[in-house]
């Protein structure tokens, strides 16, 4: 399972059917006496606030996270409808509408037994291109942070197969929720087709996670000792946000259309050898990738000390492994990648920096941002291009043993940006990179060169267990690339 732009997913055409949620209890509301009302998490509150403010300024901020997967054979529409309904009923956060009440973001979930799904024929397509364009536009128009439901579900039906899709607003899920979606819906569908009841592991509610989080951190202030790690990072960095160190050609306080780009860095065999090289150097594969990123940024003119943000999943803390929600804390990480240090030395620095970061995972990112950078917190976006690194090993996700059959893919989209974000995924096919960045000529040059240098660096590590030779972003590009080397980008407006 890998992440890449939806426009790159050339799914076979067919007949599109969608399932729409409906409440038998009438209009969704959180205006009543408060019974059943829950407080949103810090991530959700900030996300919703940005949507409110941008809508009020007639400058809407939009994004979605989507997943697709394949069903072999003629689709049993009734079985899929029941599987989708069971999935929504199982995860409380998907049954919530969010609304601002007395300054606090509140949500009240609809009772599971008050939800129904209504199927509707949408359209039929005879080309992959037309289908892809339809789905991209469908997701943009149907996903709205300020309106319930906060996701859309459908399938592309053919005589001998189907592609199922679900697209979500970020407020109800994160990237690691996508393999959970695939695993649950597929497992339930297959069980129902066999005439069996689905059997799934427990999935505690994300709303309980949000309640616990707010109880622990809402009352803290800027003097709290749990913020010491953040304060030390800010003191060395000079500001709250670590800047992306390469030229993107952006102007202050301006948002841009995006480039959404994905490519293969290492094939399956190379990724296996790369992992062994990382193990020999005393680290894990994600540490090796981060070490390579740091060296490539430094060689392009960045600092010798790497500083960046890194999303960290909080699912493992208390049994949330099978729950859908936004279980991500974003943390600063720093380590020495200065000239003259070999792969083993940089890897050791990454390992130490990561260990230090994990030992201070306590305070939620949004709360630290609000307390330590209140002026920046009041803005609708990060203030400038921020250095950001994300890595997920999809082979360790629920249902990964069936990914070859289900062929799941995930996709992220954002209307605009003012910087660059890169996500790395490891799956059975290798190591992949997906980047979203501003659509400027400078950014295109920078990111193209950076990707080339990074690909060469991780391959050098796989071949030789070291950086081997200095990396230069100005190195001549190969005149011909194989299909697995080609970076495919999509210009989105």
Image (cartoon, rainbow, N blue to C red):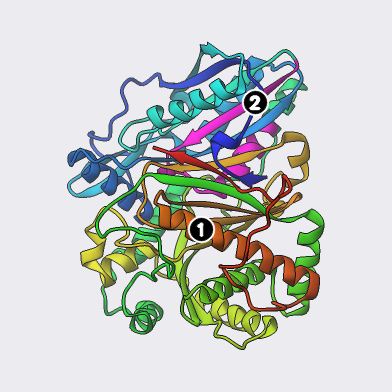
Which element is circle 2 on? strand
Which residue matches tag 2?
A: 163
> Which tag, 2 or 1, sits closer to the chain's start?
2
Taking 379 as reference, is 267 left or right? right
Q: Residue at x 54, y 21 (%)?
A: 130
Q: Residue at x 57, y 29 (%)?
A: 165
Taking 467 as reference, is 410 left or right? left
> From what the image shows, is residue 383 above or below residue 86?
below
Can you tell which quarter of the image residue 197 is in?
A: top right
> Relative to the observer, which residue lies in front, 240 or 439?
439
Q: Is residue 295 magenta?
A: no
> Where is residue 119 drawn, in percent x and y?
52, 14
Report crowding for label 2: few under 14, some 14 to 19, many 20 or more residues within 10 A (C-alpha): many
Q: What is the number of the mark on residue 283?
A: none
Number of numbered markers: 2
Q: Residue at x 46, y 42 (%)?
A: 413
- Which residue ends up furthest to the bottom in the rendered image? 340
User: Tags 2 and 1 in contact by the CB under 8 Å rule?
Assistant: no
Which residue matches tag 1?
A: 447
> Relative to the observer, which residue lies in front, 265 or 72?
265
Q: Is residue 173 magenta?
A: yes
> Where is residue 186 drawn, in percent x and y?
68, 32
Of the two numbered discs 2 and 1 in the rendering, the one whose residue sits closer to the viewer? 1
Q: Is residue 36 visible?
A: no
Can you tell which quarter of the image residue 317 is in?
A: bottom right
> From what the image shows, is residue 335 above or below residue 243?
below
Can you tell which quarter of the image residue 385 is in?
A: bottom left
Highlighted magenta segment, given as a residue range: 160-186
> Where is residue 181 drawn, in percent x and y?
59, 38
> From what the image shows, is residue 76 above or below residue 249?
above
């Amino acid at each position: 399972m890998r992440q890449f732009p939806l426009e790159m997913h050339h799914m076979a055409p067919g007949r599109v059917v969608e399932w729409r949620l409906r409440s038998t209890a009438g209009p969704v509301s959180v205006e009543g006496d408060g019974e059943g009302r829950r407080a949103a998490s810090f991530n959700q509150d900030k996300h919703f606030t940005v949507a409110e403010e941008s809508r009020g300024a007639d400058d809407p901020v939009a994004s979605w996270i989507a997943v697709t997967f394949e069903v072999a054979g003629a689709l049993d529409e009734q079985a899929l409808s029941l599987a989708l309904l069971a999935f929504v009923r199982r995860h409380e956060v998907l049954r919530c509408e969010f609304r601002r009440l007395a300054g606090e973001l509140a949500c009240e979930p609809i009772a599971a037994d008050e939800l129904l799904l209504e199927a509707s024929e949408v359209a039929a397509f005879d080309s992959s291109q037309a289908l892809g364009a339809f789905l991209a536009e469908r997701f943009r128009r149907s996903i709205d942070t300020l309106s319930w439901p906060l996701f859309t579900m459908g399938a592309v039906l053919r005589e001998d197969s189907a592609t199922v899709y679900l697209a979500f607003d970020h407020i109800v899920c994160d990237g690691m929720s996508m393999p959970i979606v695939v695993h649950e819906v597929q497992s339930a569908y297959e069980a129902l087709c066999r005439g069996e009841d689905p059997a799934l592991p427990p999935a505690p509610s994300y709303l309980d996670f949000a309640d616990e989080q707010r109880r622990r951190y809402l009352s803290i202030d800027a003097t709290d000792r749990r913020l010491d790690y953040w304060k030390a990072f800010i003191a060395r960095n000079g500001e709250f946000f670590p800047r992306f160190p390469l030229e993107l050609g952006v102007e202050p306080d301006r948002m841009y259309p995006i480039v959404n780009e994905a490519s293969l860095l290492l094939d399956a065999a190379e990724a296996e050898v790369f992992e062994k090289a990382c193990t020999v150097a005393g680290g894990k594969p994600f540490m090796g990738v981060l070490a390579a990123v740091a060296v490539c940024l430094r060689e392009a003119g960045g600092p010798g000390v790497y500083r960046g943000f890194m999303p960290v999943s909080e699912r493992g803390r208390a049994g949330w492994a099978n729950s859908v929600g936004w279980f991500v804390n974003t943390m600063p990480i720093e380590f020495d990648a200065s000239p003259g240090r070999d792969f083993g030395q940089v890897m050791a620095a990454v390992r130490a920096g990561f260990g230090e970061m994990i030992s201070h995972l306590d305070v939620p990112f949004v709360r630290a941002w609000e307390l330590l950078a209140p002026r920046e917190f009041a803005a609708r976006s990060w203030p400038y291009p921020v250095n950001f690194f994300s890595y997920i090993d999809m082979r360790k996700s629920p249902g990964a043993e069936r990914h070859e059959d289900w062929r799941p893919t995930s996709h992220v989209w954002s209307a605009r940006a003012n910087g660059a974000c890169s996500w790395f995924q490891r799956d059975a096919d290798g190591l992949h990179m997906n980047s979203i960045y501003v659509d400027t000529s400078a950014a295109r040059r920078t990111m193209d060169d950076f990707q080339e240098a990074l690909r060469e660096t991780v391959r050098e590590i796989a071949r030789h267990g070291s950086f081997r030779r200095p990396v230069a972003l100005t190195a001549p590009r190969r005149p011909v690339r194989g299909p697995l080397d080609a970076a495919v980008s999509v210009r989105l407006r």
